[in-house]
Each structure stands twice: as structure tokens, then as C-alpha cells.
Image: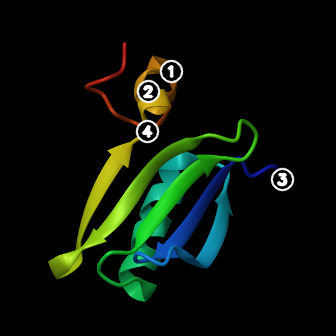
Amino acid sequence: MNRKIMASLFRGKKKEKVWTRYYSWMDTAMPRAIQLALRTGEVGDVVEFSSVELGFQIGTLEVCPKNKMRLEYSPLAKASPSLMKLMGDKAHAT
């Protein structure tokens, strides 16, 4: 089984790695990473999603106060319509 998406939780400003998980698909990585971040994360923690094969960052998910999350796609991911379509962002899909 080849898991192409890596999600890593980094703790606050120290950027200490708390955990790393590997996923086959972004649509399974995102909900599971949110669940784990809400359970084990603290305000200010960041989950970084990256491609194992290509070695670039897909985006980040920041834990905010009151159990809110802020998602940001990397500029490289935003520039790729096929990648945005795979991630389910209909606004950027062509």
C-alpha cells in the first residue's frame, strides 16, 4: 500500500513534531487530521499536509481558539487545478 500524503502536527512556535501520519487520499487525511488535532492539539498547533512523492507542501491546518480550524493551501497547490479538484475545492476546479 502506497500512502502519498503525509500529515504532521507541529506544536506552537517551537515547531516540535508531535505526530506524523500517512494517508492514501487527501479526502481521508483531512477529516482524520482534524479529528486528531482537536483531540491532541493545542491552540497554535499546525498540521502540515505534504506530498511524499513530490516533496512539496499541500497546505496547513492551524488549531485556533474555541475548536476552530484555519486551512491554507500552498501557492503551488492553488496553481494546480487538477490537485485542487482532487482535494474537493469546487471554486478552483476547472
Query: Does residue 11 lie above or below 24 as drawn?
Result: below
Answer left or right for 69 relative to 54: left
Kind of element beneath mark 4: loop
Check disc 1 and report the residue beneath it.
82
Q: CA distance from mark 2 to mark 3?
A: 23 Å
- What residue does disc 2 label? 85
Secondary structure category for the residue under label 2: helix
Could you tell whether 12 is left or right of 18 in the image?
left
Q: Amino acid at mark 2?
A: Lys
Give the quadrant of residue 78: top left
What SS does tag 3 mark?
loop
Across and down, in percent, residue 50 comes to 59, 48
Q: Amino acid at mark 3?
A: Met
Residue 42 on image: x %, y %: 35, 84
**Residue 30: x, y in percent?**
45, 57
Q: Residue 13's quadrant in the figure? A: bottom left
Does residue 5 lie above or below 56 as drawn? below
